[in-house]
Structure formats: structure tokens, C-alpha cells
Amino acid sequence: MGGSGSKGKGGWPFSSSAGGSDSGSDGSEQTLARLKGSRSATPFVFTRRSSLYYDEDGDLAHEFYEETVVTKNGRKKSKLKRIQKNLIPQGIVKLDHPCIHVDFPIILCEV
């Protein structure tokens, strides 16, 4: 759900290759043990990067258009022109409800 992360060596705390290993348990138990031992690592995503933009007037939207009037052979015709300049991205947005990260390695429901 839009969570950012790196795919570098040992970058994700839930991967089976990061950290030490217990010889007496399977991979899911190792992952849960690492999850409980690490206070900074969490499977939840609390923020995301927004896809909305602010325009010069302070309006917030995905896209902005300007209506232009074109005169051709004495006829007036209006067209919509997409505005792509002077837009400021909204940035990081806090989610109302936390989501589970897409790279979380535990099966939550099996049918």
C-alpha cells in the first residue's frame, strides 16, 4: 500500500535472511521472534505518499484543467487544457487506520 523501503541486503527486518537463526524452529517462528525482539520494526504502515497536488489557489486534486476558448473559422469551441506546472505535491499523509505492509511474510488467512 505504498510503503517505501529498500531492497538492499538485510534492509527489511522480516526477511528470512536477516539476523541470526534458530536451528530448532521454522522460518515463521524465527520471523515472529525477530518481530517481538525488535521495537522499531513493525508490520504496520501508518503513513503513505499522497498522489494529490495543490495548485496556485490552494485547491487539492489529482489533476487540474483549464478551459480555453479556441476560435476556428468564426466558431468558438472550448477545450480543456491540462495544467502540469506550478503544482505542489501533498507529500506524506497519515492513514486513518494502519495497514499491513505488503512485504509482511506471514500468511494471515488460508482458505
Image (spheres, rainbow, N blue to C red):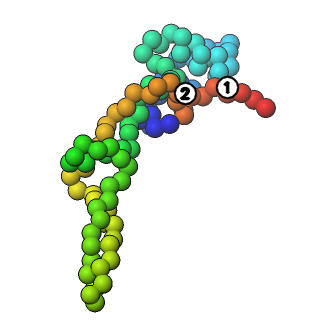
Q: Position of residue 21 (x, y in %)?
A: 57, 17
Q: Residue at x 33, y 66 (%)?
A: 80
The numbered mark, 1 or 2, whose residue comes first in the sequence reads 2
Q: How many marks?
A: 2
Cα distance between the residues tagged 1 and 2: 10 Å
Q: Which residue is mark 2?
A: 100
Q: Position of residue 10 (x, y in %)?
A: 45, 28
Asked whether residue 88 appears in the rendered view, the answer is no
Q: Residue at x 32, y 43 (%)?
A: 60
Q: Is residue 21 left or right of residue 8?
A: right
The amino acid beneath tag 2 is Ile
Q: Are discs 1 and 2 less than 8 Å apart at CB?
A: yes
Asked whether residue 41 appears in the rendered view, the answer is yes
Task: Specify the quadrant that holds the C terminus.
Answer: top right
Q: Residue at x 29, y 79 (%)?
A: 76
Q: Position of residue 27 (x, y in %)?
A: 64, 22
The front one of 55 and 33 is: 55
Q: Which residue is mark 1?
A: 108
Element class at badge 2: strand
The disc label shown at residue 63, or none: none
Q: Position of residue 94 (x, y in %)?
A: 39, 27
